[in-house]
Amino acid sequence: MAYEMTDEERQEYDVVIDETVENAKGNPSRLMQIATDATRFLSVASNTIDQIKESGFFQRLHDLLPTGKRTQQMNDLQNSVNSLSVSQEEIREMQKMSWRMIEQLNERNLLTADALITVKNNLNTLAVEQNEVKNAIISMANKVADRFEKLENRVADVEDSQRLETWISGIEVDDYYESLPKTIRFLKIVKDYYERKKSNYSRDELKLLRKAIKYAGLDFKEPVSLGDITDSLIEELQTFDESEYLKITKIILPDNATITNEELSDILAVPSFVTICMLPESKKRLEPAVEALKDSLQCDESEALKKIVKNDIQKHNGIDMSVKMPLADLGIELISCYSAIPDLVEAYKKEEPEKLKKKEDNNIEAQTDDSESESGEYEYEVAEKLFEEDKESNAKKIFLAYKVSAEKGYAPAFCELAFCYFCGDGCDIDYDAAFRWAKKGSEHGYTLARWILANCYDDGLGTLKDEAEAFSLYLELAKEGKAFAQRIVGYKYLVGDYVQEDEEQAFNWLQKAVSGEDSDAKYYLGTMYWDGKLVEDGYQLIKQAAEEGVEVAQDWLKDHGYGE
């Protein structure tokens, strides 16, 4: 039987649940978070643990484990994680607790109407291969759906209901809704519903969402999957203003507070909501891979992007993107997330400094130990030796050594690991991870980390595009005498990339970079001399760049009759 547990284990888990419920008293957002965390963990397998061990839902569930199990089993699990090997048996201990958590939250009627629909949707979309486990999960999803139907329908707030009804009656004649593409129109309806009713939904109030969807010219019963929604949004965003999309999906927080996409995915383990909010960034992050793979995928750029984005979502969330649900149920799930996020963000912002302090204390404690292995220094030195021996054949080992070193808090490994993720050295390219580790490295002032961070901001890789932040980082490095940064700053002034064209600034910075023996800078400065009629000086610099392997300089020489 799937997730079978002894009476003793059940009692241990129930004590945890009692404590959790007591701590979350009066906070339905926290209970929804616990339920979706537990749901997400049911799809975790031993070969995916390394991808999720730093995620918010994993850490929150780990912290909830009964003390006895945490000390006896989870220490072994953490050790196994650090060595990149976790047994299925160890994972199942956490899955059994997750299962019991969902079971009890449902049986004790602790979830709100919108949270029940969210948990039901997430259970149904889990990607699980074993039939026995899949059948058990489907059965649990049906029980949750049944709980929603039997949920006592409290009296709706008259004022809220009237506000919703007035808005709904105007949808049919509102030209703005009609002008929106189909899926974006659905998201706009969901968001506008939430803005008029932000929490404490009765069943009747949630049914008004169906009416709103219908009045917008959409079928609230239409079966849709997250794959369908993703495909449709990618197509619609080819022509729809991305900034307008971001306004529609923007998370509203008190006091104009903000939340990064990394924090969002850390706080809430609901793939549909995170996917929709992060889609523009995901598109941007994965476009380089699309360009590289579209020919091998034998399809046009749009279709290649759909495949790669969906594969990325499935890989990081353990879900089946083909599972259908009624459009209205997806809408309720999104409203539930919009409603929960403000409370969860407030708690996250309070808890995060404490977690960071605890981590720093642990690192200090580790570094006072005589063991280099505890601090991560040993693994870093192993990586460096492997690099010196043979970078190419040792790439995977080098990556793993840097990874373990960085995860133990050894600062010099932060930027090296970021570089591995950024370039795909010994691992798949992962711009999210590259940005995260580069940011950590930049806090320690490492040049390589700041360069990677600048690139991420410049091209919107692993984060939102921010040319101002990118230029600020490049300029900071240029002023420190880094030739590559001086060349980048000079080039931006030369062509007017983010900054206004300024030949004097371009010349000064490129000249500094050439003094630092930057080959590309020689080509750019050479073209400036050439265009300024200092032909011989320009030719000599471009010739030097070509001899140093700058392809564009080699091409220039051929085009101007100097090459073969």
Image (cartoon, rainbow, N blue to C red):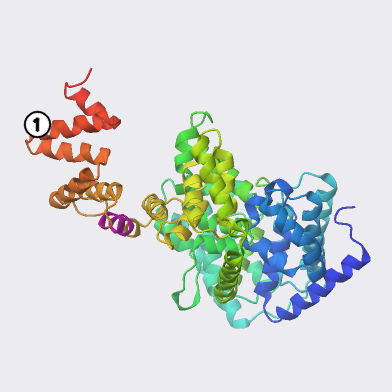
Label 1: element kind: helix
The residue nearer to you, when weighing 532 against 315, is 532
Residue picked out by circle 1:
536
Figure check: 280 above or below 356: above
In the rendering, at what x and y percent does residue 303 appear? 52, 37
Image point (25%, 46%), residue name: 487
Task: Give amino acid for label 1.
Answer: Glu
Q: Residue at x 77, y 66 (%)?
A: 70
The quadrant holding residue 472 is bottom left
Q: Position of residue 454 (x, y in %)?
A: 37, 54
The segment highlighted magenta reads 471-479
Q: Main secondary structure of the magenta part?
A: helix
Residue shown at the point (30%, 46%) measured from the top left = 484
- Quarter holding the C terminus is top left
Residue 414: % across, % down: 50, 55
Residue 474 is inside the magenta segment: yes
Residue 115 is at least partly visible in this image: no
- In this orientation, which residue lies closer to the viewer: 441 or 288? 441
